[in-house]
Image: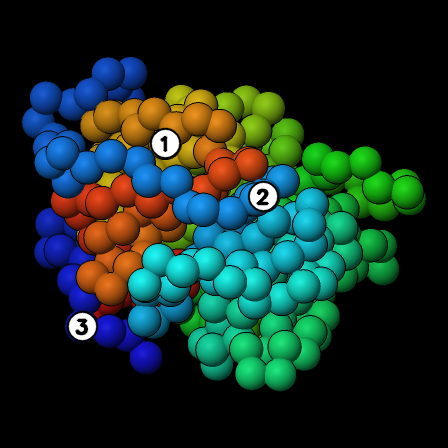
Amino acid sequence: MNRAWCGVTASFLVISTVWAGNGFSQTASSEARSVVAPGAKLERVQGEFIFTEGPVTDPEGNVYFTDSRKKRIYIWSIEGKLSVFLEDSRGAVGLDFDRNGSLLAASTAGRAVLSINLKDKKVSVLADSFHGKQLNSPNDLWRDPKGGIYFTDPRFVTLPYPKEQETEGVYYLSPDRTRLIRVIGDLGKPNGVVGSPDGKFLYVDDTPEDKTYIYTINPDGTLSNKRLFAPTGNDGLTLDSEGNVYITSKGVDVYTPAGKKIETIPVSPQPTNVCFGGRDGRTLFITARTAAFTLRMRTRGIAVGKSEERQ
């Protein structure tokens, strides 16, 4: 299902084993090149939005993204055209693609993780409760190489019913969809989530702390070895072909795999999420509340959806 796009470099695979314990720089690293293509500028996607979020790319490079306030899912095509994919998204925010090609959605308003058939647009609920209590408001998700789903479950919005979960946590739904476990329970409001393409590491940011953490993924889907990755982290995350981590905060902060800051890409309004798309995987697509932008990059994305390497 993957296009012939650049895979993860050998250096990324080696570095991934020694990510822990590095210091973090508040300024651009003198050893790292800019990830932005020379002379590139932000280009605004033409459209009227209220709160954009959750971008993810399909195998061709088209980008799906949400407007949770309008309850819509849009497609930005490789030709640069905008269209509506789904009119009633049930308040979807974060998106990813399942191994069968279905679109996965974290439904904040619906308090559930959903699967959406791309052909008939039928919506199925994959998870909406934990230990008999309704989930808070799933916000973002990442489907791992095995087919399991990690998703964050904070409560940012005001809903007409009480919060049933005592913890704003992170969960793992097994590949066969029969087992849901809480894998993180000590963050304030976990928000963005993404994993490495080899399925060994998970990044999660915590909005109240404005920090991003990295975890080791264990064979059973649980997490261990929590450590601070970057002293910033407010919303969505993505990775590129060099293993760099893109963290949305006041702008888009870019860090090396070792946790050293390369640069900040200024974006206004404040960005909410980010992914790579386009025919060659070198277009950074940025959702930013009432707007969305594209930016040509020197680096490529690493994933169809958020998970597989581009071959």
User: Which residue is painted at 40% across and 60% down in the image?
Assistant: 81
Crowd around label 1: few <14 · some 14–19 · many ≥20 (10 Å):
many
Count how many numbered circles sit on residues in the image. Answer: 3
Q: Earlier in the sequence, mark 2 or mark 1?
A: 2
Element marked by disc 3: loop
Q: CA distance from mark 2 to mark 1?
A: 20 Å
Instruction: Kindly identify which numbered label has been placed on residue 252.
Output: 1
Q: Residue furthest right?
A: 161
Q: Nearer the viewer, mark 2 or mark 3?
A: 2
Front residue of this view, candidates 217 and 36: 36
Amino acid type, label 2: Phe
The residue singled out by tag 3 in the image is 4
Q: Nearer the viewer, mark 2 or mark 1?
A: 2
Task: State the image coordinates of residue 2 (x, y, percent, origin top left).
Answer: 28, 74
Element marked by disc 2: loop
Circles 1 and 3, Cβ within 8 Å, touching? The answer is no
Front residue of this view, candidates 79 and 153: 79
Element marked by disc 1: strand
The colour scheme of the drawn protein is rainbow
| Quadrant housing the C terminus | bottom left
The residue singled out by tag 2 in the image is 49
Q: Earlier in the sequence, mark 2 or mark 3?
A: 3
